[in-house]
Amino acid sequence: MSDGPAEPSTVPPTSPTPHEPMPPAAWPAPAGGGEGEPRQRLHPLSPVLHGAKSLVVVIAGLSWSTLSRVGFGWFAAMVAVLALGATVLSVVSWYNTGYHVVGRELRVYEGLLWRRTRAIPLERLQAVEVVRPLLAQLTGLAELRLEVVGGGKTEAPLAYLGVTDAARLRDRLLALAGRVAQAPEPEDATSAVAPGAPAPTVAAPGRPLHAVRNQSLLISQLLTPQAFLLPFGVAFVVIQFLTAGSWSFVAVASTLTAMAGVLLQPVRRVLDDWNFRLARDGGTLRVHNGLLETRSQTVPLARVQTVRATWPLLWRVNGWLRLRLEVAGFSVAEADDRNRPDRLLPVGDLPTATMIVAEVLPGVRLDALTLSPPPTRTRWLHPLGRRALGAGLFEEVFATRSGRLTRQLVIVPYARIQSVRVVQGPIQRRLGLASVHADTAGGSGATAQDRDLAEAWALAADLNQRAHQARHRP
């Protein structure tokens, strides 16, 4: 069971310790006692990157109809004024933002009129993610994002730091949290990368497991409903234009924007999972992926709650599937699901998926999970998809199968089961059926749908017993 949420707390300022030299980008902490290193500012180019991001948001927020009403000159003036204001606010925010490590806490200071200090207990730290958006890659910078047990969102994102500084701080925080052993720093490491210079190439730690071919990734996203139905949508729009005889700029731009929205999900998946590499480093998984925005994530295997294998309909011709994780302690409530470290295999075949699942769940073979179907009378509830349902108990895990067009297999280790529920709807009562839910701390868990009522109660009792034994196993 995961720990409670890590609440930010207000702490008194501290002064630097005498035995640690003050780095050039630091300022003395105000007097007031306490131990810890001097507070440090973010990279001086941070306001520029925040201002550029605000400019993109402003342009995207102003619709094509605004441009047609006010004209290009006024439109450009509006964008310039809003971008300048955002940059000024970014400079003020940067000047009043700082961070330092005090004991086993990371403290982040921010705010001008309303000062705020957040203390992140490192014993609740699950992972530190290094993210490099496109502008950060061009300027040699990186962003640090912290995942804390029970956090409602990513804590204390530090944007931006030098690439080497970000990697060094990540390793230090993980070492203090007891997640990994801190690697010795090279003597010639620099704390920043010159703007426009390529980032230093650092060998990925751990034992390499798999690298996804970009060609397979592209083909897999072409075999999605959005991409498959796009030609029909284009043909429909062209016919409408030819029939109405309207080729105005606003109409064309609005249509292209709508088409871009349809393709947003597969395009974003390609950009996010480009050059996907997976490695094993002791008790953690190292995931590196991304094209325009690169991400380096550390996933603790001890907190993996479920593994999900999904076979989309159009992928079955090539025998492809994808693997996802549910990890306790990560911010599942994030609006942007890209912040969640749930990617295990964006696309791959069954032998590759079997090998990866065996690394995450030792002793579990994905290709050897034989599940029993529900009773024959479930055909009244699932006339075409009864055989797609299944459930089974194995030595270390509970597995369920569902879906006909998009098949899904969910694997839950017994030690991760938090509760077991038997649910029976009105139609199920008439048919003598019930569904068994195995809930986890990481999310939805697994559900054995429409089992015989006696079998459902026996399955629930067996799951409770196995979960209790697994949690108390030495």
Image (tube, rainbow, N blue to C red):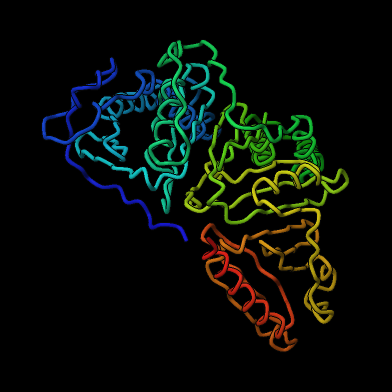
Quadrant position of residue 29: top left
Quadrant position of residue 24: top left
* Residue 127 place in picture, x, y as percent: 47, 41
Q: Nearer the viewer, residue 203 or 78?
A: 203
Seen in the picture, residue 200 relative to 299 is either above or below; the reply is above
Seen in the picture, residue 316 relative to 238 is either above or below; the reply is below
Count all numbered tags in the image, as a single digit: 0
Horizontal arrangement in the rendering, residue 44 relative to residue 377 (left or right): left
Q: Nearer the viewer, residue 461 or 472?
A: 472
> Is residue 81 in view from this perspective?
yes
Horizontal arrangement in the rendering, residue 331 relative to residue 100 (left or right): right
* Residue 290 place in picture, x, y as percent: 61, 30
Seen in the picture, residue 458 relative to 180 is either above or below; the reply is below
* Residue 319 place in picture, x, y as percent: 85, 46
Seen in the picture, residue 306 relative to 62 is either above or below; the reply is below
Residue located at (57% from left, 69% from top): 469
> Is residue 77 in view from this perspective?
no
- Residue furthest to the front in view is 474
Residue located at (81% from left, 63% from top): 370
Q: Nearer the viewer, residue 200 or 57?
A: 200
Q: Nearer the viewer, residue 50 or 402?
A: 402
Horizontal arrangement in the rendering, residue 187 relative to residue 321 (left or right): left
- Residue furthest to the right in view is 317
Residue located at (78% from left, 30% from top): 215
* Residue 145 place in picture, x, y as percent: 44, 36
Quadrant position of residue 115: top left
Residue located at (81% from left, 44% from top): 351
